[in-house]
Image (cartoon, rainbow, N blue to C red):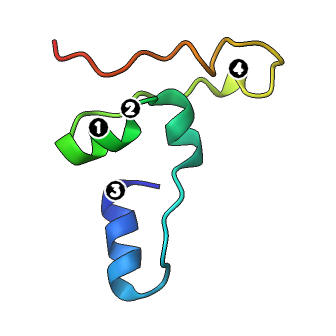
Amino acid sequence: MTLDRANALISEGTIDLAAFGQAFIANPDLVARLREGFPLAVPDKATFYGGGAAGYVDYPSYQAA
């Protein structure tokens, strides 16, 4: 899901609420990133459901270069 797609689907009346599941995993500050137009980090799918913290709690918040 992207912000543009979510807004379009909501505007069309297709959905009432957009889900950003994987985006939340890689972006602990997702709401701020979407609000400010910051780029989103890409989740490392190889770490999904691996049983450890890697890939779930080690993604940093956005830092401007």
Which residue in the protein does label 4 denote? 47
| SS label for mark 1 | helix
Describe the element under mark 2 as helix, strand or loop: loop
User: Label 2 belongs to which residue?
Assistant: 29
Look at 42% across and 15% down and name the residue there: 60
User: Disc 3 designates what residue?
Assistant: 3
Q: Is residue 2 above or below residue 54?
A: below
In this view, 17 is above or below 57: below
Q: Secondary structure at mark 4?
A: helix
**Earlier along the polypeptide chain: callout 3 or callout 1?**
3
How crowded pointer 2 is (Cα within 10 Å; few <14, some 14-19, many 20+) is rated as some
Q: CA distance from mark 2 to mark 4?
A: 19 Å
Q: Earlier in the sequence, mark 1 or mark 4?
A: 1
- Judged left or right of residue 51, residue 20 is left
Residue pictured at 51% horizontal, 38% vertical: 24
Which quadrant of the view contains residue 27?
Answer: top left
Q: Contact (CB < 8 A) between labels 2 and 1? A: yes
From the viewer's perspective, is 13 left or right of 47?
A: left
> Which residue is label 1 attached to?
33
Pointer 3 with pointer 4, Cβ within 8 A: no
Cβ–Cβ below 8 Å for labels 3 and 1?
A: no
Q: Secondary structure at mark 3?
A: helix
29 shown above or below 36: above
Look at 29% across and 38% down and name the residue there. 32
Q: Earlier in the sequence, mark 3 or mark 4?
A: 3
Is 55 rendered above or below residue 33? above
Q: Are marks 2 and 3 in contact (CB under 8 Å)?
A: no
Label 3: how many Cα within 10 Å (few below 14, some 14–19, many 20+): few
- x and y, in percent, of residue 45 in the image: 66, 28
Q: Nearer the viewer, mark 2 or mark 3?
A: 2
Q: Residue at x 29, y 37 (%)?
A: 33
